[in-house]
Image: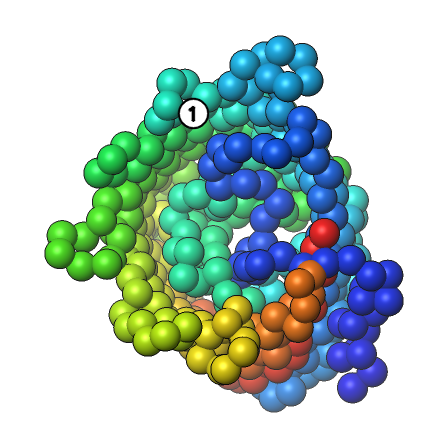
Amino acid sequence: MAVLALAALPLLAGGGACAQTSAAPSTEPAAATPMPKPVMLAVSYYGDALGDVSGGVSPGWAYEGRLGLILDVDLGQTVGWKGARLHASLHQIHGEEPTPVHVGALALVSGIEAEPNTRLFNLWIEQQLGRAATLRVGQFTAAQEFVVSPTAGVFVNSTFGWPNIVAQDLPSGGPAYPIGALGARFSYVGPHATVLAAIFNGDPAGPGGGDPQHRDRYGLNSFHLSGGPFLIGEAQVPAPHTPAKLRVGAWWLDRPVPAQPLGPASVPAGPQPLTRHSAGHEGDWGAYAIVDSVIAKRGDASLAGFARVGGAPGDRNLIDAYADGGLALTGFLPHRPNDQLGLAVAWSRIGRAARDADAAAIALGQLSVRRDYEAVVEATYQAQLGAHWQLQPDLQWIAHPGGHVPLPTVGRAQQPIPDALVVGVRNVVRF
């Protein structure tokens, strides 16, 4: 239990907390907001102590932390560039990643998981265009504004932020933490709808194979154009006669997409099964829809809910169908208006190309476990312990980690990775 105590270490340095965390916490603002000062510097610290106490690849504890330095400059007040804003952020990531070492899941059990390093995350300029539109250009992510639910921001697992279907299907995980991408984003906030459209470098980590974080160790590779353009658009509208807000969007990746791997990495070398999905494809795409709504409100307490679905072609993507949803209860305790209690569920289906490849490998005697889906259930309690400090106990259950792949430690016996139970705590300090 000593690992749990590490989560409180940042408090010894003093400082503050943010008012809201997210499953994939980001240091970039979602939209242009008035700046009270010409130059603003912020510091944030996220510390996650999480343990796989049952199942998974190898039960055990891990601690990972992320220190963020964030700079915002109003270019109108500083250099006379009216309506422009500069934003930059740097991450210092340290500790051990719990998911690959202990759990073996596709969805990272911590939204701050990344390889230990110091990296540039954001570097962009945003220009106000009239009263309702902005244009952002530079290095940033789609994960701050696209495909995300505000209600889901309380959860720790990464899939409730940047969901599995895009994190697994896009090159290098797409333009999302921890790798920003070179891009341009247009935003229009009208009286009845908000419209977002963006184009990004198709492979944020740059050309090459292997781990994307090894190809882009310091957050600088995204300034190289590679991987074809990635385009994404989203419309946000209020649902008629309800407090709900609807988000619908789609994305397109304009590059050749190789065929899905014929099976998990545990399939031995030798004759490979042929399936109707073995050929590559021209381009990739997906679509999604999200609904957020306040379900009930009484006094200082409110209950909000979210639901999100997404799809992508199953002949070229590891995940071809995705759904999640959850509830967040705020202000339910007297004199604690900012505490939140959350419960959420996520489901990711393995694409049909990968499933068919596993079936063919099983027929050849190369495999005995067929991938099907991965599911996540998370219960969390976010306690606002002071003006600048949050502490968040968390419980997660992961069914079919990795999508129901063989346990790597048992060799050719090919038993599936057991369902995992993960417990821990997130500590957030921000000032």
Image quadrant where one finds the N terminus: bottom right
Furthest residue in direction right, as rendered: 12
**On screen, residue 117 above or below 222:** below
Residue 319: image quadrant is bottom left
Residue 6: image quadrant is bottom right
Residue at left offset 62%, top offset 24%: 74
Residue 30: image location, x then y, percent: 49, 41
User: In this image, 390 relative to 274: left or right?
Assistant: right
Residue at left offset 22%, top offset 49%: 238
Residue 410: image quadrant is bottom right
Q: Is residue 308 visible?
A: yes
Q: What residue does disc 1 label?
A: 134
Residue 394: image location, x then y, percent: 58, 78
Residue 413: image location, x then y, percent: 56, 83
Furthest residue in direction left, as rendered: 241
Q: Nearer the viewer, residue 370 or 134?
A: 134
Colouring: rainbow
Dot 1: what SS? strand
User: In this image, 122 relative to 150: left or right?
Assistant: right
Furthest residue in direction top, as rendered: 80
Estimate how packed mark 1 is, as few (under 14), some (14 to 19) or many (20 or more) residues with alpha carbons within 10 Å: many
Q: Nearer the viewer, residue 117 or 21?
A: 21
Q: Is residue 174 visible?
A: no
Q: Amino acid at mark 1?
A: Thr
Residue at left offset 82%, top offset 61%: 14
Q: Nearer the viewer, residue 57 or 4?
A: 4
Residue 217: image location, x then y, percent: 74, 41
Q: How many marks?
A: 1
